[in-house]
Every structure is written in structure tokens, then in C-alpha cells.
Amino acid sequence: MIEGGTFNITSLDKPTNKDLIVSFSPATNTVKYTYTVFKDNKVLETKDINNNHVSNFYFEQTGTYRVTVITTDVNNTEHTITAGNYIIDKEAPVLNLKESYIEIYKGDEILLAKNITASDNQDGDITSKITNNAKEINLDETGNHLLTYTVSDEAGNITSKNLVINNLGSKQNLFFFQVLIIIALVLIAILVIRFIKSWRLEKRLEPFTISPLKDNTSSAFDRAINVYQKFLESVTTIYKKSVILQKYAKRLDKYSTVSFLHKNGTEILVGKSFLSIIFLIVAIIARTLQLKLLNPHEFIFPLLVGFFVLDLIYFIKYKAYRSKLENDLLSAIIIMNNAFKSGRSIVQAIDTVAKEVDGQIGQEFSKMSLELSYGLGIDVVFKRFAERVQLEEVNYLTASLTILNKTGGNIIEVFSSIEKSLFNKKKLRLELRSLTGSSRIIVYILLAVPFFFIIFVSLINPSYFAPFVTTKLGIILTIGMVIYYIIFIFFVRKIMKVVI
């Protein structure tokens, strides 16, 4: 044993990815010693040992370790023993693959080492150590092939990444398919032009013709609607078997009041799915005309757009419908109040509103009049009316009539109060819209500016924003910007929202 003591492992020739135990055995004449453990040239631990027992050092985390021991023997002589470096490397190398999916045609030459690099925290650039399984797959066959790149550092850490190579086959086959699509589109365009011409001719000749008493013929538009209705009926029976789809369909039931094609939420859900498929087909045709196939993200995007475009249309129509409903309700209340002042009953007042008011409110009061004629009570009729229109003012009206029907009271004063309350509420809402009009315009401009900016720059330089959808960092930034934009819209709506 040398003076001071020894280490069981003095150093490592190369990095290791395994845990390491290093022992220091002091000399027999050692009285005490102090050891200091360094990690990456920084002091990790210092400890005084007042005997000559063995000390063990456990190195488990990634880093470069070194141990220095100062011993003191019976003669009070100090000895310094240093061991290291112990390199623990448990970090896998980084494999940078710029593309995870590429498309090729039969006979194309592909550079397997292109756009791929590798680096390691200890070994630096290790791109030359990258291997792949190209010899195990036949890239000449049509279809998807999984090419796996693998790299390992000196410590034995391994990283792998996959590249999907889609062999589209012969360009001639795709070109033939492209020609067929173009011919089909031209034929469809010709049919549409002929239909428009015949429709215009029919409109011009209509004033000079006499319609038959019984006409069993139907227009092309009507036939298309009938085919679509049959499609809805057949698919709706399938959707009704799913509990999850039915829960989602119930949220869409309110839009059935503004749709002439869909009777309920389930049919609206079928229509959303149908539009998704249509958008996907259009996207496939567009990419085929470019001699390309859809990437995974290009496959999902048209599906999402097609699925939610119907929500946007119905939301706008439903909002306009609700606004008109609220305005017509005030007219209905005024007519009913005037009817009560002239001595008419509730049933007669409802009949008057059904005759005098057009639109949805007029239809609803016609339903109420019909239900009263079938023997339903006033409470039940107005309760059903409130459930159909889902307006807070109608709930007040229903509650007031229910109380009056049970306890009695002056119905003219009650309706005058309701009329005044609704009128003041409408007046206050219009005043608020007038006061916040400039702020809302500014908000709408701020929300629209990013889109106009993207369109304007894309017209000048179409490839300017390409890195945002083709690179990994660009996709991350795009997702971040979308999330930020959604948060911005959320808070702006909360700030601008005024509850009356």
C-alpha cells in the first residue's frame, strides 16, 4: 500500500452510462483524513473522517467526477491522493431529423444521410456514427417504408428516430389519375353551366307559360334535397346507437330551429361529418393535381375545417334568430297587453298575437293556440313555450301567468309591468351597444389584422410563412401563437361582455 491510501478505481478510460462505486482505502498508519468530491470542477461534498475506515463514493448522475483525499498519519504527516476523472454519461445523444415523412416515386434517388445530424453532450458531433436499416427494406416497393436511424455515444447511450418513406409508385399512373380527375371536373363544370342556362331559360319563359293543375315533376335541386334527406335518415339510425354521439347531438338541437335541412341535433352531426368528408375529398383532389399526396397534418386540417364550418354558419344564423325573437317578443307582449285592456281573455290575446305577429314568435303563439284548443291548460302551454324558445323573458312571463292563474290578480298591471321592464331592458341594451360601438370595432380590427397581414405577405412572398408549418420549431411557434390568440379572444370577450 502506498503512502496515504489507494482507490480501487483510479480513473475511467472512457465514459460509462452505469452507476459507479469508488472506494478509498486509507493506509494502516492513517489517523484521519479529509476527502473532497468534485463534480464538473465544482465541490460536491467535503467530509472529515477521524479514523482509517474505508469510504465509498457513489456516482449515479451524469457528470465528470474527481476525488481528492488528504490523509494524516501517526507521525502527523499529510499525504494528498487524487483520483479521477470518472465520466458518467447517462444522457442519450440528440438525433436531429428534419423530416419524419417524405414521398418519393419509383426510380427516384434518395440521399439517406441528408438533413440528419447527431450530437452528444460528451462526444460532440457524432453524425458520422449514424446508422440505418436501409439494407433491410426495399424502397423500390410501392407503399410506406419505415426507415430507422440509430446513433450511440461512447458511453453506450442509444437514440433512434423513424422516417416514413412513402413510395407513390410510377409517375405515369399518378398522371393518368390526375387526367381522369381533370376530365371529371370539366364534365361537372359543363353540367353545372347547362343547368344554369336551362334554369335561366325557364325563368324567362315562366311568365308566358301556364302551369298544369297537377305537376308530379320535381326540379334537380328538389331531387338533390330528397337524396340528401334519405342519406340523413340512414346515417342517423347508426349515430343514434352511440351514447357519446347522442350527448354531443343534444348540444346541437338548438340549431335545428334555424336549419331547413336538419330536423334535430343528430342530423346536424351527420351533416358536419358529411362536410368533413367533402372537404377531405377536395383536399385530396387538390394535392393530386400537384402530383402529391396528403401529409398527416394536411389530412387532419380539412376534416376539422369541414366539421366545424357548419357550427360557424349555424351560430351566426342562431344569433340573428335569437335577436329577432327577442324583438318580436316585445311586440307580442304589447299586443297581449292591449288585448287585455280591451277586455279579451288570455286565449283571445294569444290568438291575436298569432294573427298579428309574423316570424318565429307568431308561429310559437299559433302552436300555443292550437294546444289550448286541444284542452291543455294555460300553465302547461306557456311552460312548453318557454322550453322551446329558451328566453329569460319568457320564463318571467310564464311564471307571472302561472301565479295569476292560481291566485288571481290584475293581469293588466302585471303585463304593463312586464312590457315596461322589457322595453327598458331593450333600450338599455341599445344604449350600451351605442356606447361600446367604437370599442367593439377596434377589437374586431385587432382580431382581423393578423389574418389580413398573413394574406398580404403571402401574396407578396408565398414561401415566407412556410417555416411555420414545415419545421419543428415553426410548428411549436404556430401552436403557441394560436393558443395566445385564443386566450386574447377569451379575455377580450370577457372584458367587452356586459350582462343586462
Image: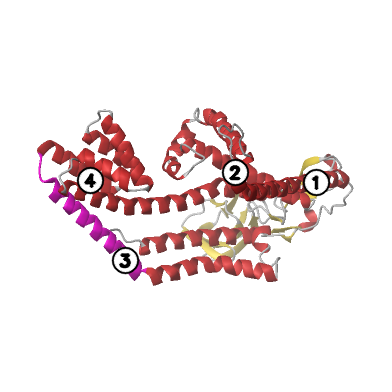
Q: Which quadrant would residue 372 be assigned to in this image?
A: top left
- In the rendered image, residue 434, in percent from the top left (x then y), is placed at 34, 69
Residue furthest right as drawn = 107
Which numbered mark, 3 or 1, is in the foreground of this view?
Answer: 1
Q: Position of residue 82 (x, y in %)?
A: 62, 62
Q: Secondary structure at mark 3?
A: helix
Mark 2 and mark 4: span between their CA atoms? 40 Å
The image quarter in which residue 15 lies: bottom right
Mark 2 or 1, nearer chain start: 1
Position of 375 compared to 8: left or right? left
Q: Nearer the viewer, mark 2 or mark 1?
A: 1
Q: Is residue 490 left or right of residue 233?
A: left
Along the viewing direction, whichever of 306 and 389 lies nearer the viewer: 389
User: Magenta part of the protein: which range?
Assistant: 408-436
Indicate the position of residue 288 as horizontal and vertical percent values.
76, 48
Q: Is residue 90 left or right of residue 429?
A: right
Label 1: element kind: helix
Pointer 4 residue:
397
Numbered badge on residue 366: none
Tag of residue 183: 1
> Tags 2 and 1 in contact by the CB under 8 Å rule?
no
**Left or right relative to 351: residue 304:** right
Q: Amino acid at mark 3?
A: Leu
Secondary structure type for disc 2 = helix
Q: State the mark number for residue 275.
A: 2
> In the rendering, which numbered label is found on residue 432?
3
- Whether 421 is among the magenta residues is yes
